[in-house]
Amino acid sequence: MSDSTFKRVELGDIAERSAGSFVDGPFGSSLKSDEYTEEGVRLIQLQNIGINEWFDGNQKFISERKFLSLKRHGAVPGDIAIAKMAEPVARACIVPPVSKQFVVVADCIRLRPDTSRFVPSYIAKAINSPYTRFEAEKKAIGSTRVRINLTTLKTVGCLVPSFERQTKIAEVLDTLDAAIRGTEAVVAKLKAMKQGLLHDLLTRGIDANGDLRPPHTEAPHLYKETPLGWLPKEWEVSEIQDMLASVDPAMRSGPFGSALLKDELVEEGVPFLGIDNVFVERFDRNFKRFVTPGKFLQLQRYAVRPDDLMITIMGTVGRCCLVPLDVGRALSSKHTWTISLDQAKYSPYLAMLQVNYSDWVLRHFSKDQQGGTMSAIRSETIRSTLLPVPPRDEQEAIAVILLELSRRLREEQTSFEKLRLQKSGLMDDLLTGRVPVTPLLEGEAAHGA
């Protein structure tokens, strides 16, 4: 049931009752790009304003002297920054304490709420709610460059409860925001760790004690020079074509042309895989195309096998994943390369990681770029790709370490997505009064106890 204590309040009535409490940036010659400086008073630009989120990149400044002439356009931490332009129009965030003083540019607006009646954190979230977003977009002008001016924005309304409820709702959502930021930081850290560890493990490997070998600079006697740089003496370097499985064909793309016509696809049957099933390190089981069992038998040279590498050669070229062990019968398509490796020689998992991330593979694939864009990957390019080849038992030890790190990363990414979904649902419920906030706070307190 909706909470009837929520009232529609126009943004113009939320601002402090003083001149300059709701302003946009300076226009035209009042502020030119050649007046930007390396340090000084920070500018608030469109790129800094996210949906309840501040993006701190693209930093630009003006001098203290210039600021004196633009003081009425100033902002301080705790104010609300609002974007005049999409995407989306009228998105808002709290100005953070990354600087003591700011100035909004022409496409941005600064709102200073009357804090005796309104909680800034709540108001920023309410501006981003579907209720206010719908009204702002309805009142915005332009088709290709949607925008809303200050005068119009002042008439846009948001739903506001009592001051006490604003405080409680902001508390719940701010707590979720903190959890999301924390989880996002962990995800970023694990991604960086995985990237660095992958490089170290595939250039230094693991010694008999299960530790990373010391780098070449510290123990040159443990290494030899190879086409991929300095690698442990026990390792080899091989082309992918020398590590293919003894199946025909071990590397395939197709079927092409009349071998499979569009009208031969059916609603259910044997999955016909495409680029929408292949993502970086992830096979997507959302099958959309199928062939009959009879057609599959005709085309079974293109059948996938468990632990095959699949590499996209359309759309985003070069994404790679492994075919799951339990995939059953399925066909690959002309939009992917599907590769069966001799698993006695090489770990498909390590090969898949290198196709996605390793400098030596990405540099090799870049030979097929045309005009800075990779439109496909040729058979010869894949066949001639060099990979470092540790002894097979060392490959397994390396894979175990990377699999564990990937598991941790997936868990954190899942937590991150759950928190984002939880926040999205809660925002819609709390900011319209559909769900009362008190039980949530009581539940949070009980959980904390």
Image: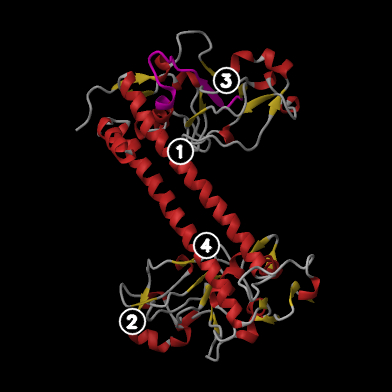
Please report the residue visible at 56 percent of the width from the left and 83 percent of the height from the top.
341
In the picture, the disc for residue 405 is 4
Foreground pick, 440 / 209:
209
Circle 2 or circle 1, nearest the eye: 1
Q: Is residue 223 shown left or right of residue 264?
A: right
Dot 3 or dot 2, earlier in sequence:
3
Give the spatial CA distance, label 3 vs label 2: 65 Å
In the picture, the disc for residue 292 is 2
Q: Amino acid at mark 4?
A: Leu
Please report the residue visible at 31 percent of the width from the left and 35 percent of the height from the top.
445
Circle 4 or circle 2, nearest the eye: 4
Q: Amino acid at mark 2?
A: Thr
Give the spatial CA distance, label 3 vs label 1: 24 Å
The residue that mark 1 highlights is 178
Q: Amino acid at mark 3?
A: Ala
| Residue closest to the far front | 209
Q: Is residue 107 magenta?
A: yes
Q: Secondary structure at mark 3?
A: strand
Is residue 223 visible to us here? no
Residue 301 locus on image (x, y percent): 47, 87
CB contact under 8 Å: marks 2 and 1: no
